[in-house]
Amino acid sequence: MLDEIFRTTVLASAIRLATPYIFASMGETFSQRSGVLNLGVEGIMLLGAFASYYTVLETGSLVLGLLAAIGTGLLMGLVTAFVSVTLKAEQGISGIGIYLFGLGLSEMLFKRLVGTPTHVKGFPKVDIPVLTDLPVLGEVLFNHNIMIYLAFLTVPLSACILNRTTLGLQIRAVGQTPEAADAMGISVARVRYFTVTLGGVMSSLAGASLSIALVNFFQGNLTAGQGFIAVALVYFGAWRPYWVMAGAMLFSTVNALQLQIKTIESALSFDIPDEFAVMAPYVVTILTLIIASQRVEQPTALTKPFERGE
Amino acid sequence: MVNPQHKAIRSVEMKKIVKHFPGVLAVDEVDFDVQAGEVHALLGENGAGKSTLMKILYGLYSANAGETLINGHPVSIKSPRTAIELGIGMIHQHFMLVPSLTVAENVAMGLRSSRGLLLDIDIVSERVRKLSEIYNLNVDPAVPIWHLSVGEQQRVEILRALYKEASLLILDEPTAVLTPQEVDDLFKILRRMKEDGHSLIFISHKLKEVLAISDRITVLRDGRKVDTIPAETATRASLAQMMVGREVVLRYEYEPVEIEESRLALTGVHANSDRGYAGLIDINLTVHSGEIVGVAGVSGNGQQELAQVIAGLRPTSQGNIYLDGKKIDSCSANQRSLMGLSYIPEERMIEGVIKDFTVAENVVLHGFDQFPFAWKGFFLNLGAIKKTTRQHIIDYEIKTPSTETPVKSLSGGNIQKLVLARELSREPHVLIAAQPTRGVDIGATEYIHRRLLQARKVGVAILLISEDLDEILALSDRIVVIYEGKIVGEVSREEANINEIGLMMAGASQPE
Ligand SMILES: Nc1ncnc2c1ncn2[C@@H]1O[C@H](COP(=O)(O)OP(=O)(O)OP(=O)(O)O)[C@@H](O)[C@H]1O
Ligand SMILES: [Mg+2]
């Protein structure tokens, strides 16, 4: 019985829950690898979530909804890049600023334009012939909508870009020793603009994956801290895409277990305190973070704006 | 990777270049030019403005006034990218390498890939390997930079410049970390490049080298140009005079000092290198009070490990180290320093100073919590710190706008003088000096040598690790040669013979 709950319900829901984390943390991986800590992820997620939700609500078109999210992410990413790369602002502080801006603006727009929470018709599940019909595996892995597959697709893609392309090499060089990259003719600013803007788009998609693919509605502070967790997951995964994904899966699995707590309790005929259940994902993450961080080498130029030594 | 498609540079002219930094006029109306097929050397004391002038040419700094012409046409070089596109390459005084990336990745970064967006590291590695063979550089493309010794990193810089086939190559103190043999090899490469019509700008403090390689020599002093002269008409003495403004003697009276008790002893010491394999093998070494023991060897043969093991920055895997007869194997670097050990590290930018701290803060890096710099071990005595710093600045002729200037904006040689001033003023029992005059101008070299001899006279035990054989021969009472982590020979001052030592450095065993 417990076995079954775990295999199907918990794992399938963990995969769903991991989706926004993966989008956001892959984007953040790029920006941190190049030396920019973007703490505004949460705010951009909220704006992306609202933009896509509202578009779908008005037009009924999911494609337009996605485009709205991408546009929002692009814009917010550029703003973030401008603040942290061109203005060389303190990244921790400016990130919080972007978060508060996104939180406030998305809530205000929602109240003005929508008012009462209304569900939209989000991305439907995709039936993959044969695969979806497989026992267990089919339900866990091949019973999801397109956004979820897309999220998991960004992981190998990110790893490939970072490790096997000239762009990836530039990103890594800029994040470690910007002076050296600069001296070799790499534009530190251009690379960072690229990664931070990409991070913005991915964060916005993370928001959209909530509002038009997973929960299919919007409300103020819909993301409830998931953007911040995505940032932490990047550290957790030591700036490596597959590790970051593993972190996201671990976190969302514990999360999924917690959602199924009643079922599990009754199966075990054992009572788990609520407080403990709520804390569990965070505790597990922090513990793993402590263990993992022992052998981690972070981008040495992280959070440091670049200036030629003039 | 594709070679850059720039046009050949026939001439570069810099006219009336001016560069200010806060509190310093680093370059003052300097004219400088270089033609295809020549080596133009740039000479001057530490802080004379050599690197600054070259960084302007390479687009790292922008000049406050003046213009640059290439092949007679004015150009505006706003960033290294423009410089690279114009065919200018530069080997920097402080390496521009990314430590976590491999040699091949460091070469490939900033280059276009032959596979478009995808990296072609295998192709780059292959070419790096070939170049490394042709030019005898002995560089493995797959190794990350942080595994390499300074000398090896310098070879990577040279290799990267060769790889890019720049039309004009600026070399800012490329030989500071090379051995005599490596310098010969580099000169062969440079001569070949010159014959192929490349223009070369060469900066060095070693007058012998400058005279050997250059066609013309320009001397800077305090940001101004003293003169440009053809190399044939120059001598070491005349150049030194032009640079310093006074006569410099690099010959010292050797006074025998009564050798007393053993201060530093290593018995059967083994240690691993960063790359995991044996870095030091069975080192037995004693340095007595009033004695300078020179460690000669080609860079990367265990010198860095030796210095770090003694300083407490690298664990030993076997053997013991004694300081004044006390076993110090388990003491931390800080404890050793308090027990009277001073260390002038080879990588001064990393181990010697904190780049973002001011000159004064760096002066009290050790002992900032002790009298006279602190009161009750807690309150800093800023007055005393400033006073000591000022004294160091005067004694060692350190060029800095103030005691509150961050160390990173000092010229390379002046940073070295600062570290030396700090370490020698602590009146140590034992001094480990690793490449103490690397990158230091001759005036200051003379000064540093005199200071070391003075310390010897008052009974300090000095371990002098240097790749400069002339320096070792001039100062040491005893010379040991290190090769592949082992001490392969030992000679006294009287029996020292430069050829024999050179052979031992290359791995030949000591003739009986
Ligand atoms: N980025 C900087 N900011 C402030 N001052 C600087 C900076 N770079 C150089 N300076 C100052 O300009 C002067 C010239 O320095 P520069 O590095 O050109 O000397 P150098 O001739 O290369 O000396 P060295 O032989 O020691 O390398 C020095 O007084 C130095 O302190
Ligand atoms: Mg210099």
Image (tube, grey):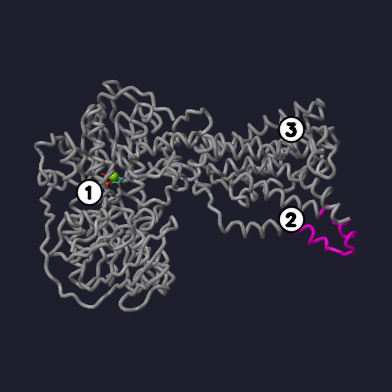
Q: Quadrant of the N terminus of chain A?
A: bottom right
Under tag 2, what secondary structure?
helix
Q: Estimate the spatial distance between the alpha carbons at disc 2 and disc 3, rounded to whole Å.
A: 29 Å
Q: Main SS type for the magenta part?
A: helix
- Where is residue A139, by image quadrant? top right
Residue designated by label 1: B180
Residue beneath disc 3: A51
Left-right relation of A269 to A283: right
The label nearer to you, 1 versus 3, is 1
Q: In front here: B172 or B78?
A: B172
The chain letter for the residue carrying disc 3 is: A
**Relative to B195, residue A289 above or below:** below
Residue farthest to the front, as pictured? B512
**Badge 1 amino acid:** Pro
Residue interval drawn in magenta: A258-281
Given residues B407 and A138, the one toward you in this image is A138
Q: Amino acid at mark 2?
A: Pro
Q: Amino acid at mark 3?
A: Ala
Marks 1/2: CA distance? 61 Å
Neighbor class of circle 1 (other Cα within 10 Å; few <14, some 14-19, many 20+) is some
The location of residue B495, given as percent across then percent down, is 13, 63
Q: Residues within 10 Å of mark 3 (few under 14, many from 20)?
A: many
* Above or below B123: residue B364: below
Dividing the image into 4 quarters, which one contains the C terminus of chain A? top left
Question: Label 1 lies in what chain?
Answer: B
Q: Nearer the viewer, mark 2 or mark 3?
A: 2
Q: Is A268 covered by the magenta stretch?
A: yes
The secondary structure type at the circle numbered 3 is helix
As drawn, B11 above or below B62 = above
